[in-house]
Amino acid sequence: MPDALFAHPRLAALYDVFDGDRADLAAYLAIADELGARRVLDVGCGTGCLAILLADTGRSVVGVDPAEASLAVARVKDGASRVTWLAGDATTVPALDADLVVMTGNVAQVFLTDDDWNRTLRGIRGALRPGGHLVFETRRPQYRAWQEWTIEPGQVVLDVPGAGPVEHSRVVTDVDLPFVSFRSTYRFLADGAVLTSDSRLRFRDRDEVASSLADCGYRVLDVRDAPDRPGREFVFVAQRTEAREAAVAAATRVHGALR
């Protein structure tokens, strides 16, 4: 189930305001251009920021997310009619013959178990055309980003259209690597309502991600830095492989492990 931050209607309506200008999305537009992608699937599209930007360039775009409240925000934005919005996740998306699948906002970290992560990767593979690409980011565990996540009450108060001033605070509740848990609290100063959202993320290292991609039918083409967050994240660029190539890669890994 998605976190309340994305699934609760009042919290989903705050997301874009508190998430800032999303300077990270420019890199994904550039990669879509670099790969010549015309048909794009945005997995975990949330409130639709990237999906709409991609559609504005004339691409055919599908956005999928399990949080109906976030999709409701996305559907009323300017340009939203150019995107096909689906409620669900990567395992429910049909074969789209997509050139490119993207996951931004560190969506890759919400999959806590190996089974959920692998099912997601295989679902994405089924949505891609042969030779299509998957591009996503994930935080580098070595950077220990959670040490910067605490926001004290009263430190951040923003004016939200339709809601008035809202105070946001956050506390890390547990660090048990590879898992980190935290709680976000939103206080609506106009009516005194207080809503919380509990989140838990998994931090995978570079080799672990690369191995899971290979196991699920991808070849890693590149691992880049996030231009707006240097040293903090891995940006994986992977390509769907076909059955024979995937079998050879798997056999090579097994042979190497047995040596």
Image: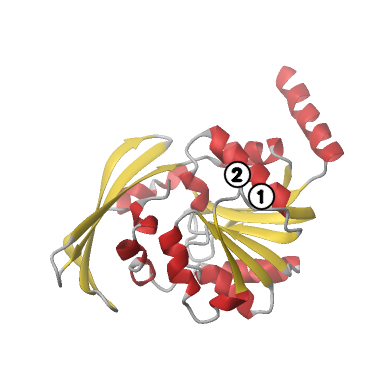
Task: Give SS at disc 1.
Answer: helix
Q: Name the residue type under label 2.
A: Thr
- Say which quarter of the image contains residue 21: bottom left
Q: Is residue 156 left or right of residue 118?
A: left
Identify which residue is drawn at 56% across, 40% down. 117
| Residue 22 seen anywhere in this rendered image of the structure | no
Q: Would you call the spot at circle 2 few (<14 residues within 10 Å), some (14-19), or many (20 or more)? A: many
Do residues under tags 2 and 1 come within 8 Å of each other at their CB atoms? yes
Quarter occupied by the C terminus: top right
Q: In this figure, which residue is indicated by the disc labeled 2?
A: 120
- Say which quarter of the image contains residue 53: bottom right
Identify which residue is drawn at 42% across, 50% down. 2
Quick one: which residue is furthest to the right in this view? Answer: 244
Q: Is residue 105 left or right of residue 157?
A: right
Q: Name the residue type under label 1.
A: Ile
Work out whether 225 lies above or below 172: below
The spot of residue 131 in percent (x, y) is 80, 54
Closest to the observer, 117 or 161: 161
Q: In this figure, which residue is indicated by the disc labeled 1?
A: 124
